[in-house]
């Protein structure tokens, strides 16, 4: 992938930036405070692409980002799955035994609960962002203050790594979606995924009937997420990830069957499935 401006949510050194460089090592990373700011930067041509987290293997979906992608009419053009390895960081020369407060995002703190419980006399304090917590530790130059963040944040802010891989679950991973103003088609020689949004008639059995055509066509659904339909209280929209391409005969057959059921189908993107290097 050629060098591009890629927007992400968080401070420099955030896990989103780590994932961004996995996907595009030569990218110009562009930090933003909120997920909506990422989408806006792409729509306003201030960034070429945006990277949004969509699910974590431990805490589950960031489902509001499905809504953001659909409502902004951005297209999903790629995905990346990044391992999340938390570290305990401190100012240069700091000692773990001297820490009295540790800052991080609440989700990161929850993912390191066992390790943090073992830090005697340490107060755990929620902060708005993991990399932001690292930046705060660097700014305050206080050897009693630590942060939970990644190795990229440690490098960004000149902090020491006092402990590595402190997460409770060693297989902690986050999946991100790459979004653009215009849809793309992945190369013919790579495995692909398609993401759809379905609005179904509000009648008994419609979801079961809607899923049947995918099974009949031999298509594998890797994700199914329901979200409130904001236009109609207590009705829902469904987001699906399907292994395959929108133009393949099996997918066309499944979508045609859905249309006969009265489903309103929105194609959010087709893209290459992420394959780890090496």
Image: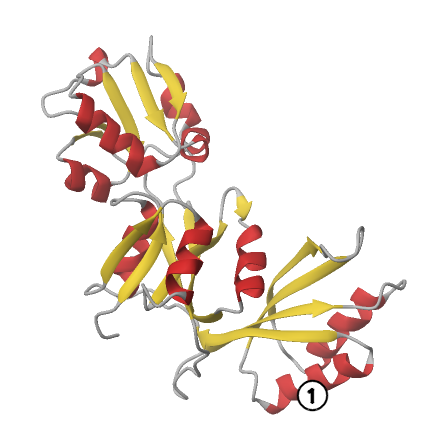
Q: Is residue 25 left or right of residue 114?
A: left
Please state which of residues 198 and 46 is positioned toward the viewer in this rendering.
Answer: 46
Is residue 90 in view?
no
Please state which of residues 266 and 79 is positioned toward the viewer in this rendering.
Answer: 266
Please state which of residues 164 and 156 is positioned toward the viewer in this rendering.
Answer: 156
Quarter of image, res 51: bottom left
Please state which of residues 173 and 138 is positioned toward the viewer in this rendering.
Answer: 138
Q: Tag 1's secondary structure? A: helix
Q: Is residue 28 left or right of residue 271?
A: left
Is residue 41 in view?
yes
Q: Most extreme residue toward the left, as rendered?
A: 93
| Position of 22 relative to 194 (above/below) | above
User: Residue at 77% of width from left, 74% of height from top?
Assistant: 263
**Position in image of residue 81 (x %, y %):** 39, 58
Q: Most extreme residue toward the bottom, as rendered?
A: 249
Quarter of image, res 207: bottom right
Please state, as top left, top right, bottom left or bottom right, where the C terminus lies in the image. Answer: bottom left
Q: Most extreme residue toward the top, as rendered?
A: 121
Q: Which residue is mark 1?
A: 253
Q: Residues within 10 Å of mark 1 (few under 14, many from 20)?
A: some
Please state, as top left, top right, bottom left or bottom right, where the N terminus lies in the image. Answer: bottom left
| Position of 235 relative to 45 (above/below) | above
């Amino acid at each position: 992938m050629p060098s591009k401006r890629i927007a992400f949510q968080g401070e420099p050194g955030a896990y989103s930036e780590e994932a961004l460089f996995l996907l595009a090592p030569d990218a110009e990373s562009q930090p933003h405070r909120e997920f909506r700011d990422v989408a806006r930067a792409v729509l306003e041509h201030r960034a070429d692409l945006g990277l949004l987290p969509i699910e974590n293997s431990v805490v589950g979906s960031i489902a509001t980002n499905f809504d953001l992608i659909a409502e902004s009419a951005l297209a999903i053009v790629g995905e990346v799955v990044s391992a999340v390895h938390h570290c305990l960081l401190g100012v240069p020369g700091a000692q773990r035994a001297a820490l009295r407060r540790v800052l991080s995002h609440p989700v990161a703190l929850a993912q390191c609960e066992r390790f943090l419980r073992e830090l005697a006399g340490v107060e755990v304090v929620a902060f708005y962002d993991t990399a932001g917590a690292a930046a705060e530790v660097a700014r305050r130059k206080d050897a009693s203050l630590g942060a939970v963040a990644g190795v990229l944040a440690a490098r960004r802010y000149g902090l020491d790594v006092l402990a590595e891989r402190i997460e409770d679950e060693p297989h902690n991973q986050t999946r991100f979606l790459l979004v653009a103003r215009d849809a793309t088609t992945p190369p013919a020689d790579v495995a692909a995924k398609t993401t759809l949004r379905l609005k179904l008639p509000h009648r008994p059995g419609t979801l079961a009937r809607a899923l049947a055509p995918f099974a009949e066509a031999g298509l594998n659904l890797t994700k199914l997420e329901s979200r409130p339909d904001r236009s109609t209280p207590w009705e829902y929209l469904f987001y699906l990830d399907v292994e395959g391409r929108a133009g393949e005969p099996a997918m066309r057959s499944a979508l045609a069957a859905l249309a006969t059921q009265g489903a309103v189908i929105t194609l959010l993107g087709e893209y290459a499935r992420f394959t780890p290097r090496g």
